[in-house]
Image (spheres, rainbow, N blue to C red):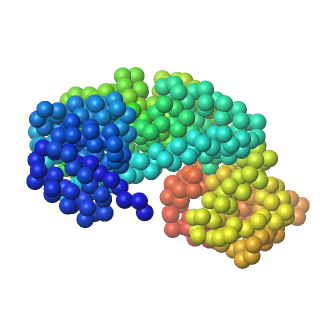
Amino acid sequence: MKQSHILIIDDEENLRHMLSIMLCKQGYLADTAAGGEEALEMLASHAYDYILCDIRMPDMDGREFLRQAINRGVSAPIVMMTAYGAVDTAVACMQEGAYDFISKPFKRDEIVIVLKKAEERERLKEENQTLKAEVADKNSFCGLIGRNPAMLSLYDQIRRVAGLKTTVLIQGESGTGKELVARALHTSACRNGKPFVAVNCGAIPETMLEAELFGHVKGSFTGATADKAGLFEQADGGTLFLDEIGEMPLALQVKLLRVLQESEVRRIGASTSRKVDVRVVSATARDLQAEVTEGRFREDLFFRLNVFSLQIPPLRDRVDDLPLLVQYLLKECAARIGREPVPRVAPEALRRLMAHNWPGNVRELENVLERALVLCDGDQLAATCLPNGSAPIERPSLQTDSTENLSIKQAERLMEMDLISKALIKTGGNRTHAAKILEISHRALLYKLKEYGLELV
């Protein structure tokens, strides 16, 4: 593995020496410079992966070094080092392009954590570049797979709106890939390389969601032991993806509307607001227009979020994409579980897959294929590896032949299976939420899943 090369800039020789030794012990290569001018000369002939730079230095301070480095095209993440009490200057440096800052005196772990976070960001940037390259592939677009006319139309709409700050509402059934579409919007835009922050509004308790979105100040409520930036601040300059927006409580919808209108957030307990530059993309499996009619969703917020709408087609409406998806997902699943080589799909297995209506969409297909890989022993994935062996894999139906089967117990069983399947599909496979919708205990749901063989729903 390639060692990361770090440039340390500080006018204090003892600190440079200490940081150099410490980082070398952590596996980094370290060079040092006593000031901004010397560092710029070194950057002219050397490429560094990361830069640690003190803010207060004679001749050229850290802020001026930062400006000149960025102007010269230096792309390495720059972490500013600042004395206690000069945090405002450090924050200003971040607004001008610094990656992060740490306050002196600092512990070894603090520096290592910041550098690891920077490494993760650089890794994500490389992945984004890879995703961009997929645009040239006629069968895919930024991680989305398919060449059905409905998908090609979706790709075109994403390209058209990606570069704008317009809010986008993504609509589609559970399992269709709404977060993938949101990431495609982000990757295709000028915000690529900036943060992409995703939150499921239905997975966070109502009492915690406000603090997660907007942040809080120390002492604002029990458990707030320190200031914390919310997700809007964390996504500053980039994209905030609000999944399952239809689950957001009405009281919080008012505050979200204000953020969208004013482009500023106020942390819980704070007396002032902070400006944010965030592109908001939301998604829902619900009919938000119907939710507005029923009074469960604010009409003004709906109009604010639904400036541009993207509709993802369900898998049953693009069955011609299924062979492409099967090939792609098999490779993904095989890599995840360590299965090599990837088996071929038998014609009968593919026929059965294409005959299914896929109420759980791509997520259901992925689950079925991963289970099939576990059961597959040879180099060919046979139909017997799919659920229920060689029998059809259609979901159970509540329709029964009244002249042949009048069993109340059988009808109750079919009804339970159908309702459980629908609840799991609606909640994206979240069994805790599904149990609440079904009004049964989580333990009872697990028992019924095992009894009816619905673990793959």
Quadrant (top left/top right/bottom left/bottom right) for the C terminus: bottom right
**Residue 251: which quarter of the image?**
top left
Q: Is residue 114 above or below residue 2?
A: above
Residue 411 is situated, as x and y percent measured from the top left of the image, at 74, 62
* Residue 159 or residue 439, whichever sits in front: 159
Give the residue displayed 36% in from the left and 46% down from the top: 47
Give the residue displayed 51% in from the left and 36% down from the top: 186
* Residue 410 or residue 455, whichever sits in front: 455
Residue 8 is situated, as x and y percent measured from the top left of the image, at 22, 48
Residue 215 falls left or right of residue 310: left
Residue 448 is situated, as x and y percent measured from the top left of the image, at 61, 68
Residue 343 falls left or right of residue 87: right
**Residue 273: which quarter of the image?**
top left
| Residue reaching furthest to the bottom | 377
Residue 293 seen in this snapshot? no
Give the residue displayed 30% in from the left and 34% down from the top: 69
